[in-house]
Image (tube, rainbow, N blue to C red):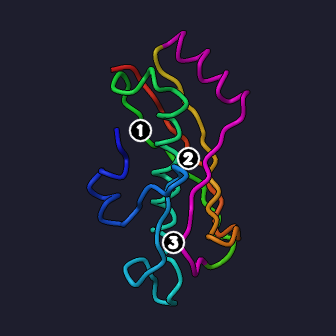
Amino acid sequence: MDVVQIPFVKKVGITQAVDGKLELAFNDDTHNHLATMHASAQFTLAETASGEFLQTLFPELVGKVIPVLRDATVKFKKPAIKTIIAYPSISDETQEKFNTQFAKKGRASISVNVEIKDVENTVTCIASYNWFVQKI
């Protein structure tokens, strides 16, 4: 699934950068009342990137599972005043644990960490998105 084609993601303005990362332009449509990047825009970028990251880690599951976001923890570090880019990651241990549990039960949970940085490499937000994934 091309996540940038999801209607809400398109509406927010998330796009694929040249390097394949997801980004969100800093413009009037993404501002809050302080003329910085709206918190929900950063949340949406990070959440979308976490889901896309799972697709790249587990391409064999695409179209065969239903992933559902269970919860998230988000901390805003600095105001975002430039275009922002999402950097998702998980540990090898987390990936192995997911693979083991999914193989046994056909369902498992997994957490994806996402760091949001602006184009000058300033961290504006860190987050963890917890997904529940089940076979269809």
In the rendered image, the residue lying farthest to the bottom is 34
Amino acid at pointer 3: Ala
Q: Which residues are magenta?
A: 80-105
Judge from the rendering whether residue 13 lies leftward or rightward of residue 85; answer left or right: left
Q: CA distance from mark 3 to mark 2?
A: 15 Å
What crowding class fits label 3: few (fewer than 14 Cα within 10 Å), some (14-19), or many (20 or more)?
Answer: some
What crowding class fits label 1: few (fewer than 14 Cα within 10 Å), some (14-19), or many (20 or more)?
Answer: few
In contact (CB < 8 Å): disc 1 and disc 2 = no
Residue topped by disc 3: 39
Query: Residue 79 or 72: which is nearer the viewer?
Result: 79
Q: CA distance from mark 3 to mark 1?
A: 21 Å
Residue 75: horizontal and vertical position, in percent?
Answer: 65, 64
* Image quadrant containing the N terminus: top left
Image: 31 above or below 44: below
Image: 53 above or below 62: below
Amino acid at pointer 1: Val
Residue topped by disc 2: 129
Image: 13 above or below 81: above
What crowding class fits label 2: few (fewer than 14 Cα within 10 Å), some (14-19), or many (20 or more)?
Answer: many
Residue 111: horizontal and vertical position, in percent?
Answer: 60, 39
In contact (CB < 8 Å): disc 3 and disc 2 = no
Residue 38: horizontal and vertical position, in percent?
Answer: 48, 76
* Residue at (64% x, 65% y) in the render: 117
